[in-house]
Image (tube, helix red, strand yellow):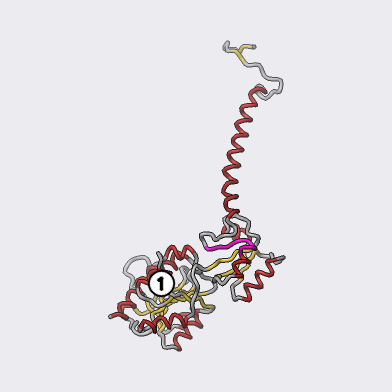
Amino acid sequence: MEKKKNGAPRRETPKNGRGYDRRDRAPRNDYRNDYKKDYKKEVKAPQEEDAGSIHGDYENGAVIGRNAVGELLKSDRSIDKLLVQKGERTGSIVVLVAQAIERGIPVIETEKPKLDAISGYAPHQGVIAFAAEKEYCTVEDILDIAKERGEDPLIVICDGITDPYNLGAIIRCAECCGAHGLIISKRRAVGLTPLVTKASAGAIEHLAVAKVANIASTVEALKEKGIWTFAAEAGGESVYNTNLKGGCAIVLGSEGNGVSQIVQKTCDAIVSIPMYGQVNSFNVSTAAAILLAEAARQHHS
């Protein structure tokens, strides 16, 4: 053993020239191996758990995998839409798409990363379906409910609501205010997913919901039946100065763009909520509560 200049013993350099004895390797390698084993367990466990639920429903209402979607299409359950991976048109996918089109279910081509995220990174085999939590009714069914109650129809129309929490909150407001039904769009809008059901706090079980292909055409059809239609947008007449008595439908727009221009032009009038603060708009579900509360007051006064 050599000595340093200060007299302290200096360890001999091992033959391998790496600064440590080969005998030191064992514990270090054991530690690394143990770490790798633990890391693999932590990563793999959730993946295996996700893969096991491929035949079931996810919290967002998605049913994933070709077999699961095939069985869903065979059932009578309402389906909001079918997401298919772009470029995936082989094998049973072709059959599933054909069945969806035959039933009038929107088929949307989607990039693989989005499908991966929706499925929780479980194997989706290029196809995901969104099943409704509740059976949809028709617009005529909503009018019949009002007739059975002996009341003037009070209808809520959602033009492109995409946030499930907003839709759920609107359903809750509509039911609390005595609305006879709610109408949503088939495309570019959220359907009746489990998150919508949760956000509605159970109100979805007591409110009829219809799904239509074209909101503007539906507004026209309601007008022909004597229903006055009001688009909720800035720049309109104050809701407190608007006569909402008699049959009426209130149209609520999407979170980003509001009521579409074509629907605004189709409606009888535009109503607004007076604003007194610095922020220029309410959240759509908050606006729904204010508008529907005023409509309910007029209907029952």
The image quarter in which residue 251 lies = bottom left
Judge from the rendering whether residue 282 lies leftward or rightward of residue 49; answer left or right: left
Q: Residue at x 61, y 42 (%)?
A: 40
State yes or no: residue 64 in magenta: yes
Identify the secondary structure beneath mark 1: helix
State yes or no: residue 226 in magenta: no
Residue 250 coordinates in the image, percent (x, y) = 41, 78
The image quarter in which residue 92 lies = bottom right
Q: Is residue 93 visible?
A: yes
Which is more toward the observer, 48 or 224? 48
Q: Residue at x 38, y 80 (%)?
A: 154
Which is more toward the observer, 228 or 193? 193
Residue type highlighted by circle 1: His
Judge from the rendering whether residue 95 lies leftward or rightward of residue 295; answer left or right: right
- Read off the magenta span: 61-68
* Residue at which label 1 appears: 206
From the image, which quarter does the N terminus lie in?
top right
Residue 172 coordinates in the image, percent (x, y) = 39, 69
Seen in the picture, residue 136 relative to 129 is either above or below; the reply is below
Residue 197 coordinates in the image, percent (x, y) = 45, 65
Residue 275 coordinates in the image, percent (x, y) = 33, 70
Which is more toward the observer, 164 or 55? 55
Using a 10 Å C-alpha cutoff, classify the residue at mark 1 as few (fewer than 14 neighbours), some (14 to 19) or many (20 or more). few
